[in-house]
Image (spheres, coloured by chain):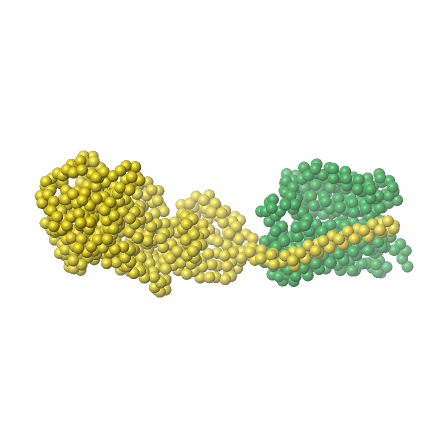
Amino acid sequence: MINTRLLKNFDFLLLFLTLALAVYGLVMIYSATHVMGLADPFFYVKRQAMWLGAGMGGIILVSLIDYQNFSNWARYIYLIGLAMLGAVLILGEGTEVQRWIHLGFIDIQPSEYAKLVLIIILARVLSEREKHLGENFFAFLPTLLFTAVPMILVFMQPDLGTAMVFIVILFGLLYVAGVNWKYIMGIIGVGAAFAPFAWAQLAVYQQMRLLSFLNPELDPMQSGYQLMQSKTAIGSGGVIGKGLFDGTQVSLQYIPEQHTDFIFSVLGEELGIIGSAGLLLLFFLLIYRILWIGTQSKDTFGSLICCGVAIMIAFHVLVNVGMTMGIMPITGLPLPFISYGGNSLLVNFLAVGLVINVGIRRQKIQF
Amino acid sequence: MSKLMFKRLRILLIIMVCFFVVLGARLAYLQVYQHEYYMFRAEENRLTKMPIPASRGKVFDQQEKELISNRPGFGIFLVELEEDYDRETLKFLSEQLELDTEEIKRKIHENRYTRYRPVHLKNVDYETMAKIAEHQWKLQGVNIEVQPLRHYPFNEVGAHIMGFLSKAPPSDSSKEQWKNDGYDYRQGDLIGQGGLEKAWESTLRGEDGEQLIETNVLGQAINYLDRREPVPGDNLYLTLDIEMQRIAMESLENQIKKLQNDGNRYAQRGTAVVIDTQTGGILALASYPSYDPNTVKEDYKDLQKDPRHPMVNFALSGTYPIGSSYKMVTGAAALETGSISERTVYNCAGTYSAVGDTRSCLGVHGNLNIYRALAVSCNIFFYRAGLQTGIDNLAYYTREMGLGKQTGLQDITGEVSGVVASREYKEERHGERWYQAETMSAAIGQTFHRFTPLQLAVYTSIIANAGKHYRPFLVEKVETHEGEIIKEVEPEIVNHADFSQRTFRIIQEGMRQATAPERFAGREFRDFPIEIAGKTGTAQVARRGSGIPPHGVFVSYAPYDDPEIAVAVLLEHGESGASGSSPVAREIKDYYFREELGDNSGD
């Protein structure tokens, strides 16, 4: 039951930052989509708001359950996650890109949830073996297997971006959990040796995207073109921007995927460096707050959950924003809370919910 | 939380801070440092300039009759195209416009990056337009626009002078010249081909306007911004008398048909040139057969296959031997060099032997002076006069008479210079030296002499006005579309022919006698109340007995005592100047002197 004791530790600042980002996102989604000539200019905004509502419900729901239960349920959660990823591949058999499970009124994107699932299982495994991570090379090896299985499933969709998120979460958590850094370097070395093999497994368009990032002239009409339009939007925004809903690149739809992957470009064009740097600041405050809660956690599992969530969000921001500005490859990772896409929004809300949960139950003894 | 974990968490935080700093620095670089550049790129994305074609200048004849005008044509366009197009519309248009659906799809596809620009499918006539308009309610994105269509009301008459429009790419030199005149050629522009349309391109075309459009990523127009109105092209007023041109064309056609009906299958082409002797203004410049500039696009292949080359303006580009019509040159040169005088008398006994060669005359003319020699066109008189004068003098005086060199016409292109028989020409062209016997042939217009019909008219005009070589011209006035005169052409003397007035008077009198009513050459003008001066020519083009008839030439001017017009008529294989060509000259003069002649000449 909820009592004031728990409510006292509820981190309203984190909730506020989360909602601020989500509302910021709604405004930008409206800006990016009302020019598309839809019958209902609020179509996308309404759908996203619906998911935001679900996210709020999710935060409350997750907060009610003691997070330590998630540690106990970690294996079942993990198996459900794998089952969903497997279902995507089976249901989507024959199509080029398999990413969603269609449930009639709603589309589920298991790879989004898999990120959170991975954080939970890794936090569980690492917190269990915390004592041995420093000197026993074999203590952390199971985490590699736990990561590899969903990664391969996601890779087969194929979704390169999410696979990269898994790797970053894995290494981030290994590091924070206290695995000897020499072991980590060794694993990275082995991984690098297998990189050419991994490259061969990439779809041609993914290879093209990476190459195009390294050399934009290679494919100017496709990826390079997208990138140029995105940079043009951001650069033309200047200091104060062209004004909300007044971006020409946006309203004339020169920006590719402007309500999803490239929504940061919309923001940059219309609100200038004030709006875009402001957004980065919001993200930083959010991440800082999550990490702070992690330091307050009563147990390692809670700390690692917080670190995992912070790493996940930070990596998304880095890759997505970097992509729109031409310093990261075009991977299709959404900008958390901002990009249109319900599954991503819900997962991020659930993640914040978990962190709040850790925060609520930070003290072992309550008076 | 363990100390190690806390330490590592701090390092993780520092790494994240670094990443955020990098992102922030990149933002500052793009949005502050490179802002101007990206602002320019965004504007370039957004704005497109669409040309608004200017209406082309008109052309009028000296009576201000419209020779080239613009009349409404109907352009069928497809607009506001989405990714997909309506099958029914496509099928209907394909049937009505007689275009392949694939062809229409290709045109749409070509336009995919510039969707603000309507796709032009075809220009149609009123009936087709009406049929499409009737069904427009069920067609998707079909627009009918009135488009000025270049119209040549006189069709074949004067086509070589007018030229036509097409999208054929121009030469680089033309492009450069237009650029200097302020017109920047773009691929696909309709431009003048031949005649005035080509030579006066930059005057006629006007200045295209421009519409600034805001376009989206699909190239669809979102907003219409600044607009600069087009400036219509300037109008040309010609010296040409289209009625005379029409009479000349019809008369040439009649003569050729008549010859063909009499079994002469060689008679296919003819030209007639009429020049105002007091200005050099061209009143008629006819070359038969011709083509219709209104339908030249459809007829082009047939025209190219026609062995008569109807698209070539033979009045400027054809070079011909002119036979006895040349004899005025020999006479004038002999007089001018003192080789003969007004009183010199030669005897014609039917044959003449000199310089190792024996030549014959068409008759036995007895004793004759220069007047009578011209009147009866005695070969022997001119053989002797020519030998006395020498080929070098003949060549010089030929050019002085305006023959074998460009006349100076600038208003349309295509003029060639022809050939003057000379020592130099023979050596250069055939690598052989000149024989004196050839001087005799040259003296009666044979051997290498090749002249254009326009030169013949200029030559006649020079004789008529005693030495003034006026530059022949067609355009006498240029006006803006608002009626402001921007150019008025004054007659220009390009050369004073190097002969004395006395020489001209002798030659003029000889020509008068040649066309006197009792003469063979004057037959056609027997009942003509105005005195004319002229000379026929029958130019051999093949060996006697080959069955190929000679060209018929007739040059003349009138009135004799106060010349106004010079007329040169040349019928290829027209058999003789008197029978083939002079009837054409007669019809032209009947028209020109219609007021003096009273009602009996009219229709």
For the C terminus of chain A, the quadrant is bottom right
Please state the horizontal and vertical placement of residue B498, each as a whole percent of the image.
Answer: 23, 53
User: What residue appears at the point 82 percent right and 55 percent down from the top-left corner?
Assistant: A293
Question: In the image, is residue A80 above or below residue B245?
Answer: above
Task: Identify the residue at the far front of this view.
Answer: B338
Task: For residue B366, say whether it is visible.
Answer: yes
Give the number of marks: 0
Residue furthest to the left in view is B366
Front residue of B100 and A278: A278
Identify the residue shown where x is 45% and y is 44%: B103
Using the image, determine if residue A198 lies above or below residue B213: above
Q: Can residue A34 be seen in the rendering of this structure?
A: no
Q: Nearer the viewer, residue B129 or A147?
A: A147
Chain coloured green here:
A
- Specify whether B149 is left or right of B506: right
Query: Does A96 sit left or right of A9 as displayed?
Result: left
Picture residue at 50% right of the left edge, 62% below the top: B226
Q: Residue at x 18, y 53 (%)?
A: B503
Q: Report the front residue among B255 and A249.
A: B255
Query: x%, y% of residue B245?
Result: 25, 53
Place of residue A268 in the rendered image (x, y in percent of width and height, measured from the top left): 65, 57
Quadrant of residue B347 within the rendered picture: top left
Percent across and percent down for residue B395 are: 25, 46
Chain B pictured colour: yellow
Q: Quadrant of the N terminus of chain A?
A: bottom right
